[in-house]
Image: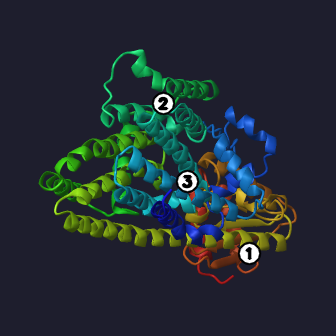
């Protein structure tokens, strides 16, 4: 490996890692509490069981259809450095992102046929896309960066095997696909990705023959076997029961928003459909004009790989979101590889256009401006995740302090911002995040937005806690806590300060449904607690 190559690899790694170094000390947020709290306590020999059972058990109040042994084991590994410390988890996340950026570099060179300069640009775009922040800065975001790693590795190895057939390379491609499948079910799209890559980029004609089918057989068997296993365990192949007209309409709207955010940054520019189409059309027209006027054969050579990664790759890796029930930028982590490679293909046209020196400098200037724009927005996104984590850290410490100082049986109403504690309760008030399970001493309740489970389960949990408190002959106190979502400043109200708080809490039990219960609890926090001094 030449010195220039080493420098190139180092630049890519630094671009992927440096923006996220501030996250190393970020505290657990949202789903982290449930996932880390569960998996960090699993014994070392538990790994094989995750191949035939959901990796998160029922911590969300239901049994998920997710077979993910390989992500699960990473939480066991990180727990070796202390389950209560988030540092090891963040190191793992950053490492996966850096490796993925290097894989994008290699895919750009091997599969797309880009020159080293444009290929490096593809890796840098992927590394600094603001949309990647959730997958890297959020510990649980690993569920998308990790499968992307093995998906890309399998695709790259297959492309290298096509360029230079070696049995060992092909075998490792199959092995990487196996790991990808048992990292996240969305990686089933690799089989059609390989077949269409051969047809579009390698120009291998589709023929109903054994010679044509043979390279795909192991991938077919693994895909079918994995889907059959899902059917045996969960009674469905790919959440097909959720597919209907409403879900399809939601998918189209969600996908269009995510694609806009991927291209224009987080949280996405508010462009009209016409405006967005005009910008995309203008970009295509410019690249097309450069191809015709200056690109010679190079521009024509980029058409097939650019079309493959812009259309086929992105469509295949967005398609699995049709069976999701929520939107998240991390769902675009793997799809964004296609966007990065498409931009790099455009730069490659500049790279070889005439007059070469002028066009190459122009291309580099445009590419540099785009990277700077993405990097500046990435910095802001990383900062926001830092704020979320600090609020979460403070909330855990404040709740623990209040609970340990309060008499047994005290009712604690915690209103932590959802962007810090969504799905966190009751996991956040249990070890390893605090010294002991607070539920044994006090009752900690909240509005539905930060409870771990579905609303009907939240209602049962909350009403049970309210009944236990109201019927306690010792008449334990009630403490209501509220945190500012940007500063983490604590507001506190107790029945000792304001006796009417007991009356307000008693009214919670009189509500007729979960909606009114949730609404009243939010009103108590926002109207009577927020803004008070601790």
Few, some or many residues within 10 Å of mark 3 (<14, 14–19, 20+): few
Q: Is residue 232 above or below residue 181?
A: above
Badge 2 vs badge 1, beta-carbon distance below 8 Å: no
Q: Earlier in the sequence, mark 2 or mark 1?
A: 2
Q: Which residue is mark 1?
A: 495
Mark 2–mark 1 Cα distance, whole angstroms, equals: 50 Å
Determine the residue located farthest toward the top in the rendered image. 209
Q: Find residue 240 and name its label.
A: 2
Considering only vertical position in the picture, is 370 above or below 59? below
> Which of the labelled discs sits on residue 515, or is there none?
3
Q: Measured along the vertical axis of the image, is residue 525 above or below residue 99?
A: below
Q: CA distance from mark 3 to mark 1?
A: 25 Å
Q: Earlier in the sequence, mark 3 or mark 1?
A: 1
- Seen at 31% across and 65% down, the residue is 367
* Residue 104 or residue 534, whichever sits in front: 104
Residue 362 percent across, percent down from the top left: 23, 68
Mark 3–mark 1 CB contact (< 8 Å): no
Residue 404 appears at what percent x and percent y? 83, 71
Q: Is residue 21 visible?
A: yes
User: Residue sitting at 37 percent across and 38 percent down?
Assistant: 248
- Find numbered disc 1 in the image and state the secondary structure of the residue it sits on: loop
């Amino acid at each position: 490996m030449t010195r220039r190559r080493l420098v190139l690899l180092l630049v890519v790694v630094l671009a992927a890692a440096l923006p996220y170094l501030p996250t190393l000390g970020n505290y657990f947020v949202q789903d982290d509490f449930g996932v880390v709290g569960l998996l960090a306590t699993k014994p070392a020999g538990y790994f094989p069981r995750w191949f035939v059972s959901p990796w998160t058990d029922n911590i969300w109040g239901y049994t998920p259809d997710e077979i993910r042994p390989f992500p699960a084991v990473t939480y066991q590994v990180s727990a070796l450095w202390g389950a209560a410390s988030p540092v090891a988890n963040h190191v793992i996340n950053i490492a996966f992102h850096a490796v993925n950026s290097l894989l994008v570099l290699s895919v750009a060179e091997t599969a797309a046929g880009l020159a080293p300069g444009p290929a490096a640009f593809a890796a840098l775009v992927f590394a600094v896309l603001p949309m990647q922040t959730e997958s890297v800065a959020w510990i649980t975001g690993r569920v998308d960066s990790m499968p992307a790693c093995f998906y890309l590795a399998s695709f790259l190895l297959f492309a290298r095997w096509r360029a230079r057939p070696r049995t060992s390379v092909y075998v490792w491609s199959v092995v990487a696909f196996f790991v990808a499948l048992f990292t996240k079910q969305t990686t089933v799209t690799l089989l059609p990705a390989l077949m269409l890559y051969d047809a579009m980029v390698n120009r291998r004609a589709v023929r109903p023959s054994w010679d044509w089918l043979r390279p795909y057989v192991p991938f077919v068997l693994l895909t079918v076997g994995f889907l059959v296993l899902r059917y045996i365990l969960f009674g469905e192949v790919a959440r097909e029961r959720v597919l209907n007209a409403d879900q399809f309409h939601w998918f189209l709207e969600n996908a269009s928003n995510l694609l806009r955010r991927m291209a224009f940054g987080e949280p996405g520019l508010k462009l009209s459909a016409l405006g967005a189409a005009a910008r995309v059309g203008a970009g295509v027209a410019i690249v097309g004009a450069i191809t015709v006027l200056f690109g010679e054969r190079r521009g024509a050579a980029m058409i097939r790989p650019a079309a493959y990664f812009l259309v086929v790759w992105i469509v295949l890796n967005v398609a699995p979101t049709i069976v999701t029930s929520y939107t998240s930028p991390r769902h675009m982590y793997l799809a964004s590889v296609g966007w990065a490679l498409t931009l790099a293909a455009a730069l490659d046209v500049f790279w070889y256009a005439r007059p070469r020196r002028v066009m190459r400098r122009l291309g580099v200037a445009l590419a540099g401006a785009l990277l700077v724009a993405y990097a500046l927005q990435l910095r802001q996104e990383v900062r926001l995740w830092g704020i979320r984590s600090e609020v979460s850290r403070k909330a855990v410490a404040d709740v623990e302090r209040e609970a340990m100082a309060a008499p047994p049986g005290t009712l604690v109403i915690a209103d932590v911002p959802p962007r810090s504690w969504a799905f966190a309760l009751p996991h956040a008030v249990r070890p390893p995040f605090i010294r002991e399970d607070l539920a044994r001493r006090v009752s900690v309740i909240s509005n539905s937005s930060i409870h771990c489970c579905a609303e009907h389960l939240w209602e049962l949990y909350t009403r049970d806690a309210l009944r236990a408190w109201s019927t306690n002959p010792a008449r334990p106190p009630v403490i209501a806590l509220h945190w500012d979502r940007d500063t983490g400043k604590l507001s506190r109200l107790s029945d000792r300060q304001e006796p009417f708080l007991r009356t307000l809490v008693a009214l919670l039990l009189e509500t007729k449904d979960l909606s009114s219960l949730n609404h009243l609890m939010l009103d108590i926090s926002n109207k009577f607690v927020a803004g008070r001094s601790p």
